C-alpha cells in the first residue's frame, strides 16, 4: 500500500528553498518596517513604546526600530482657518464678524505638541489656536465702542493679530502668519449713527484744514507788511517804472511834512 505523503529529508533541497523564502520574507518585512518617508511640508514624531523619541523627523527617507517605534505625521505648512465669532463691545453692543487666521506648527515643537496636547495636526486648531483666538478677540473688542470699531477696522485687525501672536508665544507651539477680520455685522440702527459720525469727523477735519490755511495766509501777509517800509516801496516802484509816468514818488527821507513827488521832471 502506497502512502500519499512524500518523505522530505531534513537536509534536502526542498527544505533549504523553504528556509530561504522564509528568511527573504522576514528580511523584506523588517526592511519595510524600518524605513519610512516623510513628505515635503510635514515632519514626523517617532514614539518608542508610546514615548516620544528624539527630535521631529524631517522630510525624506528615515529609519525607525521595527515593531517598537511608531510614526505620527504633523503638517507644518501654513494653515488658513476662518472663525466666525460674536462678541460684545465696550458699550455692550453685539457684533459678528469672521476672523481668518494663518498659522503653522513649528517643526521643532511637533514632539512637544504630541506629548502634551494633540496626537495629530487636525487637533492643533481646536486645542491650541481657537481658544487663544477667541480670547484675543474678546479682549480687544471689549476695549472699544462700536463706532470706533467700525471706523478703525483695519487698526483693530492688526491689534487682534498682535494679541493672538503674543498669547500663542506663551506656549511656543505655533507661528501666527497673519490675521484678517471681515464681514462685520452690526444692528441697522447703529449703521446710520456710525455714518453720521464719520461725516461729522470729515467736516471737522476740513474746517480745521481751512482754518490752518487762513492762519498761514494771515501770517504771510503780516510778515510782508512788516517788511514793506518806505524805501522798499520806492525800490519796488523804480523796478516797475517805465520811465514815462508823470507822477513819481520822491526819494524817501527828504525833509518836509508832505511826501514830495516829481511831476513831469519837476519837484512839487
Image: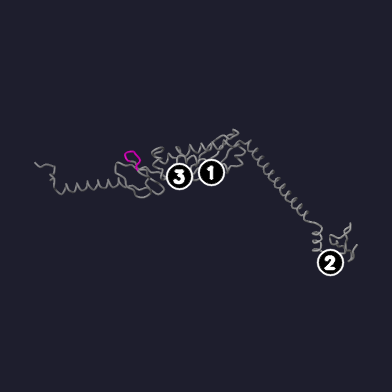
Q: Which mark, by number, is residue 243?
A: 2
Residue 183 place in picture, x, y as percent: 56, 41
Residue 55 place in picture, x, y as percent: 37, 45
Residue 180 place in picture, x, y as percent: 53, 43
Give the farthest residue toward the right.
Answer: 268
What whole-number distance in Å separates the C-alpha atoms at marks 1 and 3?
A: 16 Å
Callout 2 secondary element? loop
- Give the residue pinned by disc 1: 180
Do labels 1 and 2 touch, CB within 8 Å? Answer: no
Q: Is residue 173 magenta?
A: no
Q: Is residue 236 above or below residue 156?
A: below
Residue 233 lies in what quarter of the image?
bottom right
What whole-number distance in Å separates the C-alpha atoms at marks 2 and 3?
A: 84 Å
Indicate which disc, 1 or 2, sits on the residue closer to the N terminus. 1
Circle 1 crowding by C-alpha within 10 Å: few under 14, some 14–19, many from 20: some
Callout 1 secondary element? strand
What whole-number distance in Å separates the C-alpha atoms at marks 1 and 2?
A: 74 Å
Is 219 situated left or right of 112 in this image? right
228 or 123, nearer to the observer: 228
Circle 2 crowding by C-alpha within 10 Å: few under 14, some 14–19, many from 20: few
Magenta stretch, residue numbers: 48-53
Amino acid at each position: 500500500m502506497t502512502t500519499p505523503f512524500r518523505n522530505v529529508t531534513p537536509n534536502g533541497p526542498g527544505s533549504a528553498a523553504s528556509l530561504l523564502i522564509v528568511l527573504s520574507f522576514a528580511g523584506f518585512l523588517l526592511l519595510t518596517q524600518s524605513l519610512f518617508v516623510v513628505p515635503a511640508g510635514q515632519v514626523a514624531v517617532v514614539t518608542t513604546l508610546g514615548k516620544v523619541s528624539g527630535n521631529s523627523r524631517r522630510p525624506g527617507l528615515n529609519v525607525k526600530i521595527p515593531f517598537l517605534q511608531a510614526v505620527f505625521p504633523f503638517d507644518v505648512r501654513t494653515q488658513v482657518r476662518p472663525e466666525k465669532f460674536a462678541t460684545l463691545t465696550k458699550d455692550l453692543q453685539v457684533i459678528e464678524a469672521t476672523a481668518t487666521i494663518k498659522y503653522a506648527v513649528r517643526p521643532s515643537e511637533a514632539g512637544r505638541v504630541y506629548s502634551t496636547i494633540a496626537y495629530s495636526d487636525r487637533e492643533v486648531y481646536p486645542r491650541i489656536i481657537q481658544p487663544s483666538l477667541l480670547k484675543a478677540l474678546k479682549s480687544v473688542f471689549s476695549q472699544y465702542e462700536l463706532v470706533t470699531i467700525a471706523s478703525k477696522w483695519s487698526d483693530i485687525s492688526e491689534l487682534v493679530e498682535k494679541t493672538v501672536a503674543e498669547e500663542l508665544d506663551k506656549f511656543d507651539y505655533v507661528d501666527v502668519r497673519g490675521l484678517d477680520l471681515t464681514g462685520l455685522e452690526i444692528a441697522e440702527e447703529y449703521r446710520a449713527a456710525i455714518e453720521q459720525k464719520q461725516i461729522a469727523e470729515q467736516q471737522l477735519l476740513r474746517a480745521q484744514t481751512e482754518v490752518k490755511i487762513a492762519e498761514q495766509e494771515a501770517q504771510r501777509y503780516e510778515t510782508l507788511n512788516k517788511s514793506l517800509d518806505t524805501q522798499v516801496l520806492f525800490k519796488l516802484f523804480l523796478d516797475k517804472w517805465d520811465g514815462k509816468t508823470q507822477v513819481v514818488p520822491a526819494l524817501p527821507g527828504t525833509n518836509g511834512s508832505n511826501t514830495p513827488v516829481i511831476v513831469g521832471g519837476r519837484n512839487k
